[in-house]
Amino acid sequence: MIATTIGLLTGCNVGPNYVRPNVTAPPAYRGADNTALSSEAKDSFGDEQWAAVYREPELQNLIRKALANNYDLRIAAKRILEQQAQVKITRSQEFPTITVGGTGIGATLPSSLGSQFPNPLVDGSLNLSAAWTPDFWGLYRRQTEASRAQLLGQVWAQRAVQMTLVQQVATAYLQIRALDAQVEITKATIKARQDSVALTKTLESGGSVPLSDVRQSEQLLYAATSELPQLEQQIQQQENAIAFLLGENPGPIVHRDPNALAPPPQDLPTGLPSRLLERRPDVQQAEATLISANAQIGVARAQFFPNLTISAAGGVGGDSLATIFVPAGKTIYGLGALTQPLFEGGKLRGQLQLSQETKNEMVLNYQKTISGAFRDVSNALIALNKQRAYREQQEKLVEAAQDSTRLARIRYQGGSTGYLEVLTNDSNLFAAQLNLVSAKQGEALALIQLYSALGGGWQS
């Protein structure tokens, strides 16, 4: 009967059990309409492993190195191990503690002491003690529940770090490939403008054009040559940024893949918005934090109830090592202590109120994180849609600028127009070509943004 009563008492958990807050997911993502992206399919682009999304061998190699050596990811892994140890420490409070100890004395006494003491003097004892605080109200179980939720939060935090790392490496790689493309355009422009300078000098020496045309052609040339050092600076700094993500010292990075800025596919499924909550690491981490805060309410409530500690100890001893284990030398006793808080100046109620308000805050944080996740996906879909349209129009602009520049040069060589027309059209073409690279980069980055917004990148 007593054992049954104790079992029932130790099975009681005060405080609310966790219930997931109601969240209304939109039926579809804003931005998915008027595109080839489908939000009706249950499968999502975010479920894909990163290697199936980023197919460039150079980029895959960089991501693998980053996942193996990145400092932030390794730190996140250590935090999981730390929290695992904390769970063990917290859970240990539910069990009895047992200690064992003993003493032993052995000495040879001087003959001047006579026969009052045995010679040699031998004495010893062995004792065993135990203590247990039954978890009647679920105090320790709620603490363990909170600690395990924090462990789960650390697991999702590591996945969030991995997802962000994959996004950062892919973004940095595309940025450096865009800079490479701009360098190629700049070098080609420099070559064309050098030829133009040579032509105007020839015409000026023959008296066909004024010296001002030579100076204008030189201005075009120097405008292009001044761009090259800045682009090379950005490339080297971007290489250092990638090396840091890889956990390496600053140095060159291989970046020669010609397809890095190719237009992304247009048939990417986004899946149901309701499934995003299960895939996004930041949402799962926010919920784990909420679970822990909910368990802390039970911890605070349990402080209002009596706390019983049961202890017992026993020992044996004797005046010689041979008599230590003689039955007559045994001593066994037990002790129990029951404490009930009566007045603590409002401390207990303050702790309960604090835990309740903390949970309310975590509910809002959870809902905010979910709302932010829907916003991220919508923004990525809009960006992918509009960046594609921008790139298509920019390609048409480059074609028109190339033809306009060609015609201006023909008219100039035929004496039908001044060099100002060539200067204007050539400057417009150079700017349009650089903008086209930026448009391709923006479209490619929008794909990375969408994949990350859908919770992709942490799957292994």
Image (spheres, rainbow, N blue to C red):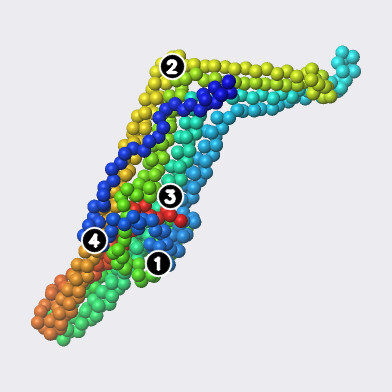
Q: Amino acid at mark 3?
A: Arg
Where is mark 1, residue-wise?
56
The tag on residue 39 is none
* Secondary structure category for the residue under label 3: helix
- Nearer the observer, disc 3 or disc 4? 4
Q: Mark 3 or mark 2, which has the lower sequence index?
A: 3
Where is mark 2, residue-wise?
344
Task: Return the x and y of residue 106 as percentages of the image width and height.
Answer: 82, 24
Question: Quadrant of the rendered structure where residue 94 is?
Answer: top right
Where is mark 4, residue-wise?
35
CA gap, disc 3 to disc 1? 23 Å
Task: Return the x and y of residue 446 as percentages of the image width and height.
Answer: 29, 59
Residue 414 makes an appearance in the image: yes
Q: Amino acid at mark 4?
A: Thr
Location of residue 211 with respect to 439 vertically, above or below: below
CA gap, disc 2 to disc 4? 64 Å
CA gap, disc 3 to disc 4? 30 Å
Q: Mark 3 or mark 4, which has the lower sequence index?
A: 4
